[in-house]
Each structure stands twice: as structure tokens, then as C-alpha cells.
Amino acid sequence: MLFLRFQRCPFSLTPGWGALTLAAGCRAVDLAIIGLPQSGKTALFKALAADHGGEEQRLAAERQEHVAVVKVPDQRLERLADMVQPKKVTPAELRLHDLPAPLQRGVALAPEHASILAGADALVHVVRAFRRPDVPHPQGSVDPHRDIGAMDLELVFHDLAIVERRLERLEMVVRSARPGEREAGERELRPLRRVREYLEQEQPLRNQPVTPEEMKQLANYGLLTLKPVLLVINIDEADVSTTPVIEADIRARYAAVRIGVAAVCARLEADLAELSLEEAIQFRQELGAAEPAAQRILALAYDVLGFVTFYTVVGDECRAWPVPAGSTALAAAGKIHSDMERGFIRAEAIAYDALLAAGSLAEARKHGLLRTEGKQYVVQDGDVLHILFHV
Ligand SMILES: Nc1nc2c(ncn2[C@@H]2O[C@H](COP(=O)(O)OP(=O)(O)OP(=O)(O)O)[C@@H](O)[C@H]2O)c(=O)[nH]1
Ligand SMILES: [Mg+2]
């Protein structure tokens, strides 16, 4: 049925396109929350996931679920929706994983936790800064800088073990390979040897000069220090009024490309997130607490991924799509639906600002503002795309 509709009308914005978009089976963007025992990982998870969500989220919390899908705050999408007035607005989503077990040298992770970590697009590292004598710190004292370094070292050792195991096996294969096959093995060995050097110097890989080609070769090993990280300093209730100062200090020390920084009192935010929005606003005022944190932290987590967002306005839906920076129009089409990738003809593209200035898609089209782009076009952040395809 869908097939016929697309064949007859591959070029127009029919509701059929919307139906296809909704059927998208694209991979979620995954964030794994890590940190020392009792640093506040679950509290942060609740703060980000509950979001004044009412009964459904309360039940999920009661079931002690450790996975939640949350929406990425997006002002551009809101403005686009104001303009288009669609029936449905679908923001980009992040899937949060609250990992119960800490990484510890010599302690094997349960396979399900290991695969969540390996598959995560970014890590959210919760660092304890709250003081509470009744919650003992595994190191005996509260020291965020020590803990940030210690976790990085755990991640480095984790990666080094993976790289050494792989190198050992590959070197054996290469030694006994025929000359023709040896070259392929050598190609795989090269980036592994290079990153081993960094790891042996206890350097996380996330900010080392790794070429895109090497990045591709290393992508399947699940190396944790290669992933971007958001450091979340979990501050004390008594310190919430100075959140921006604490955050600025930590940012000056640690923020970099692929390293984001936030300060938050996770337990307070988790408690507030369980209240209705009105009650939470009132409590916040009484406590002199900082701005609501969940939206800010989710936006920071999204930023650190280094993704670009493109938008589709199709049928009754305005939707935001995250794709890694540098993705082509063809990859963007595949993100929406595999049929769109398979039958890709071309894309019509307009920058978000230009569309807003034009006032509507129809006006933009009338004034020739929709560019025609091919498969290899590199999607720009804020592009509004219309994929034309034929299956
Ligand atoms: N005062 C204060 N207590 C907190 C804060 N965040 C967490 N806690 C408390 O610290 C304890 C541990 O918090 P969790 O969120 O369970 O920490 P976790 O990292 O998930 O712990 P594990 O999963 O056991 O490693 C709980 O008693 C929390 O109430 C905070 O921001 N302030
Ligand atoms: Mg926990």
C-alpha cells in the first residue's frame, strides 16, 4: 500500500510521507551514566528522566527501571512548530542508562553492562561533591578532582585491556598470514598501536589527534575514552545557590572539545522532578535553588555528542533528527527510513533561519530558497530537509 503511494507520488508532501517517517526504526542515541559507587548516578538518572512526568514515570521509578528515553530540549524545533502548526512535534531523543555497577580494575562487568557501555554514544560521569556523613565515600573523603582523575584512569585501563587483547590476537594472525593478507592485518594494527601509546601514558583518547579514518577503524572496539563525556558535579543542597560559580570553576579546569561540564544537586533535582511543575517552581523559589537543571543538562549532554540536528516538516509532523556531524544527505535519509536511503533521489534543503525568515515552506519554495542537494551533501546543523525518493 505504502509502496504504491510512493511510486505514484514520490515528489510531494503527502500524509503518506508522514506515515513513513513515523515508522522509522532508527537507532537511539545512548548515554551511559557512570561514576563511583554512591556518587548519585541513580539520583541524576531520576532527575533527568522524571521531569514532572506524572503517573507513568512514577510507576517506572517504582519498578526501578534503569533505562529511560528523554527528549532533547530544542528551541529551534519549538519555533519551527510555531510556524508550521503541525499536529505532532517530535524532538530528538536520548536514551539514558543508569549503570548500577562501577568500573573497577580486576572486576569484570556483567555482559549486559559491558555492552551498554561499549555501545554508548557518550558517557555522563557523575562526580560526588555533596557532603553527607551518612553516605560514606569509598575513598573516605569527598574530593571531586581526585575522583575525576580516578575514573579517567579506570577508563584508560579498560581500553588498554581491549587494545592489548586485540593487538595480541591480530599480531599472531598477521605473523602466520600469507603476504597478500598480511597488508590488511597491518592496516588494522597501525591505529591500535598508536592508541596503545597514548593509553600507556595514561592519556584518555577523546582529545588525542585521531584521524577520521582511524576513528572509523577503532569504532567497533567500544573504547570508552574515545567517547565524549559530560562531567556532572553532584553538589550539596547547601551549595545550589552558587551553582554557576562552581560550574564556571570546573568548566575552566576540564571543559574541552568532547568534554562538557555541569554542576547540579542531583538529589534535590530528583525530588523536584517528582512533583508537578507548579509545585516544583514554588519549592525552587522557597529554596533559592538554581534554574531547573534537567533541561540544561540534557542540552549539554546533547551538545557534547557533537551531533548536528536536522529537521523534517512532513504531513502533520515537525521532527528533529540527530546525526553525527559530517553525515551526508544519504545517511540522513537512512536515519529516517531505510527505504528513503535505498530509493534516494535528491534532497531539498533550507537552513532553519532562512525558512523562518521566509515564513513558510510554501513561501520559501516560491522564492526558490529550497536548495537541491545530492547524496553526498553534508548535512548542516539546522537544515530543514525534504528527502525525495522512489522505491
Ligand atoms: N545530600 C545529597 N545526597 C545525595 C545526592 N545525590 C545522591 N545522594 C545520596 O547519596 C546516596 C547514593 O545516591 P545514588 O543516586 O543511589 O548513588 P549511585 O551512584 O546510584 O549509587 P550506586 O548505584 O549504589 O553506586 C543516596 O542516599 C542519595 O540520597 C545529593 O545531591 N545530595
Ligand atoms: Mg545507582
Image (cartoon, rainbow, N blue to C red):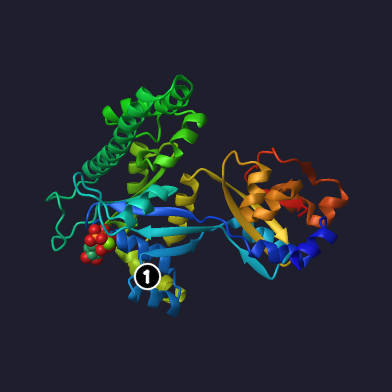
Q: Nearer the viewer, residue 284 or 142?
A: 142
Q: What residue type is labelled 1?
A: Leu
Q: In this view, does 13 lie above or below 329?
A: below
Seen from the viewer's position, the closer of residues 26 and 124 is 26
Q: Is residue 60 above or below residue 289?
A: below
Position of 43 with respect to 360 (left or right) is left
Percent position of residue 367, x then y: 87, 48
Quadrant in which the C terminus appears: bottom right
Q: Is residue 76 visible?
A: no
Q: Mark 1 packing: few (<14 Cα in 10 Å), some, or many (20+)?
A: many
Q: Which residue is drawn at 76% across and 67% down?
A: 15
Residue extending furthest toward the left: 140
SS assignment at label 1: helix
The answer to which image quadrant residue 153 occupies is top left
- Identified at 57% across, 41% down, the residue is 325
Q: In which quarter of the image is the N terminus?
A: bottom right
